[in-house]
Amino acid sequence: MRSNSKPHSPFNTKLILICASVVLFVFLLITTTSSFSKPPISQSHLSNSTHPVDDSEPTPLDCPSLPLTPTCTKTPPSLANALIHYATTNITPQQTLKEISVSARVLEKKAPCNFLVFGLGHDSLMWAGLNHGGRTVFLEEDKAWIEQIKQKLPSLESYHVEYVTKVHQADDLLETGMKEECKVVGDPRFSKCDLALKGFPNEIYDIEWDLIMVDAPTGFHDEAPGRMNAIYTAGLMARNREEGETDVFVHDVNRVVEDKFSMAFLCEGYLREQQGLLRHFTIPSHRARSGRPFCP
C-alpha cells in the first residue's frame, strides 16, 4: 500500500543534527564559563577549614595565618641594610663562614643583647644585623677609616680609641700580666694593671657586655699596636659583670700575641670552641662568686 506521507528529506535531518549540536555546545560553554567565574578556593582555606566553603566569604587581603608566621612584618632596617650592602659589593668579611658561624650561633641565643666589637670592618654591618634590636658598638683605632665607614654606613655606632703599645712589647706585657695587680677583678678604669685600657668613653665601661669580639687593633707587624691590651681588657670586663657570663671571641689566633694572650687572660679552662682562626671563650662573673680564681 502506498503511503500518502512525504518521505523525510536528508537535508532536513542534517539540519536538525547541526542545530542540536549547536545547542549542546552553547549549553556546555555556559556551564564551563559559570564554573570558571567562581572565586578560587585558597589552599590555606582548604587546609584550615572543616566546614563547607562559603563562596560569599571575602578573600582576605592580609597575610595568611600560618603556624610559623602568625603575622607579616617588615624586614628590620638593620637586616635590610646588611642584605643590600653585601648583595651589592664584592668585598667579603674578614672571617670565614665557619668562623662567623661560631659567633652567629651565640647571637642566635642571646640577641638582642649588648655586643662590643674591637675593630670596624667589612663585617660590621653583618654583626649589627645579627644583633638586631640590641646594641652593637665598634671600637676602632683609625679615625680616617671611621669617617669613611660612617659615610657609607651611618647607622653603625663606633668610637675612636688610641693604643700606646707595640707588638714587639708583647713579651714584656705578658710578664706584666702575671703580676698580682693584674689578677684583681674590677672596673678597668681603676685597675692598677698596665694592660687595662682606660681611654674608652665611660659608657663602654658602664655597660655589661654579653658578647665581646676582639678582631682589632692591627697586629700583623712589630710596630702595630697589637691586641695585648684588648684581650686582657675584654677578659676583665667579662669578670667584672654583676652576674651571668660573657662570650668572648678572639680572631687571628694563629699569631703569637692572640694565641698566648687569649690563653693567659681568657683562660684555657674557659675555652669553649676553636674554629679556624677564631677562639670562643665563655667567662663567668667573678663578682657574683667571691674567691673565684682568675683562671679555673
Image (spheres, rainbow, N blue to C red):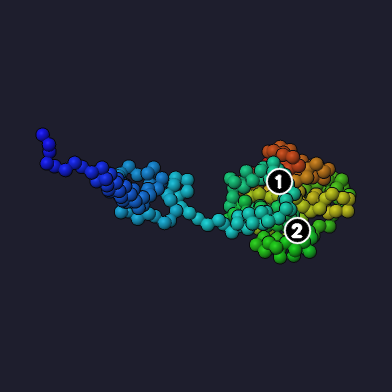
Q: Which residue is mark 2?
A: 140
Q: Residue at x 73, y 43 (%)?
A: 278
Q: Residue at x 12, y 38 (%)?
A: 3
Q: Please, what secondary structure does the residue beneath circle 2 have?
A: strand
Q: CA distance from mark 1 to mark 2?
A: 17 Å
Query: In the picture shown, does residue 136 fall above or below 108?
Result: below
Q: Which residue is mark 1?
A: 249
The image position of residue 25, as x and y in percent, is: 31, 47
> Does residue 287 appear left or right of residue 218 in this picture?
left
> Does residue 12 appear left or right of residue 239 in this picture?
left
Residue 25 or 48: which is nearer the viewer?
25
Within 10 angstroms of label 1, few (less than 14), some, or many (20 or more) residues? many
Image quadrant occupied by the C terminus: top right
Residue 275 or 182: which is nearer the viewer?
275
Q: Residue at x 67, y 64 (%)?
A: 154
Asked if residue 151 shows in the view, the reply is: yes
Query: In the picture shown, does residue 245 fall above or below 85?
Result: above
Asked if residue 161 shows in the view, the reply is: no
The image position of residue 142, as x and y in percent, is: 79, 60
